[in-house]
Amino acid sequence: MAKIAPQLPIEVDSETGVWTSDALPMLYVPRHFFVNNHMGIEAVIGAQAYADILYKAGYKSAWHWCEKEAECHGLEGVAVFEHYMKRLSQRGWGLFHIQDIDLDAGTATVKLEHSCFVYVYGKVGRKVDYMFTGWFAGAIDQILSARGSQIRTVAQQVYSASEEGHEHGLFSVKPL
């Protein structure tokens, strides 16, 4: 049986019911609820259109998250990205492993195991984890900006565990 992760701080305001972890308010919803909504939107507008929307929104959100968390915990550089991957992993999205990161070059590679999307979609022969892609570029770009770097990046999913022949997903971040 799973153990509660005491390393993930969650505070619940008794007056408002708002959940907070570290520096940001959070929502707690069942995985099937979230992924079913994701699938419903994808069915109406198409996976590529939805991926484009999520990339931009995810980029902005990751930038904001990294900025607030870096400030809250006194983190900078690679430590911010490591913290981000740790928190994403602790929140049920999947297990995110940094394969490599080079801030001077504006590059990173992230391995994803146990994706919440793959658990629901299964092996469907296409990438289903595209929601995460903008998150990586947004996080790296915020970290680069905080260091005074002018480099900006783009992220892509190389492959997904939802595709035959792959047991995990892989994402890459490269300069624009």
Image (spheres, helix red, strand yellow):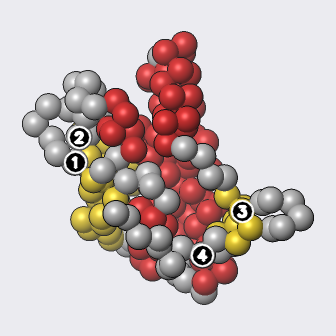
Which quarter of the figure has residue 54?
top right
| Pair 1/4: label in front | 4
What residue is shown at x 15% (from left), y 41% (from top)?
166
Distance (Cα) linking label 3 and label 4: 10 Å
What residue is shown at x 66% (from left), y 79% (from top)?
71
Instruction: Estimate the x, y position of residue 117 in percent, counting from the top left.
Output: 39, 38
Which residue is denoted by mark 2 in the rendering?
161
Which quarter of the figure has residue 47?
top left
Seen from the viewer's position, the closer of residues 102 and 64 is 64
Which residue is denoted by mark 1 in the rendering?
168
Which callout, 3 or 4, points at the residue further toward the start of the chain? 4
Q: Is residue 92 left or right of residue 110?
A: right
Which residue is denoted by mark 3 in the rendering?
19
Distance (Cα) linking label 4 and label 2: 30 Å
Instruction: Estimate the x, y position of residue 115 in percent, counting from the top left.
Output: 34, 47
Distance (Cα) linking label 3 and label 1: 31 Å
Q: Which residue type carries mark 3?
A: Trp
Which callout, 1 or 2, points at the residue further toward the start of the chain? 2
In the picture as drawn, the residue positioned furthest to the top comes out as: 44
Distance (Cα) linking label 1 and label 2: 4 Å
SS label for mark 3 = strand
Q: Are marks 1 and 4 in contact (CB under 8 Å)?
A: no
Q: Residues within 10 Å of mark 2 (few under 14, many from 20)?
A: many
Which residue is denoted by mark 4 in the rendering?
9
Instruction: Estimate the x, y position of residue 120 in percent, counting from the top left.
Output: 37, 34
In the rendered structure, find residue 40 and report the number of the disc placed on it. Answer: none
Q: Is 78 above or below relative to 98? A: below
SS label for mark 2 = loop
What residue is shown at x 56% (from left), y 22% (from top)?
41
Distance (Cα) linking label 1 and label 4: 28 Å
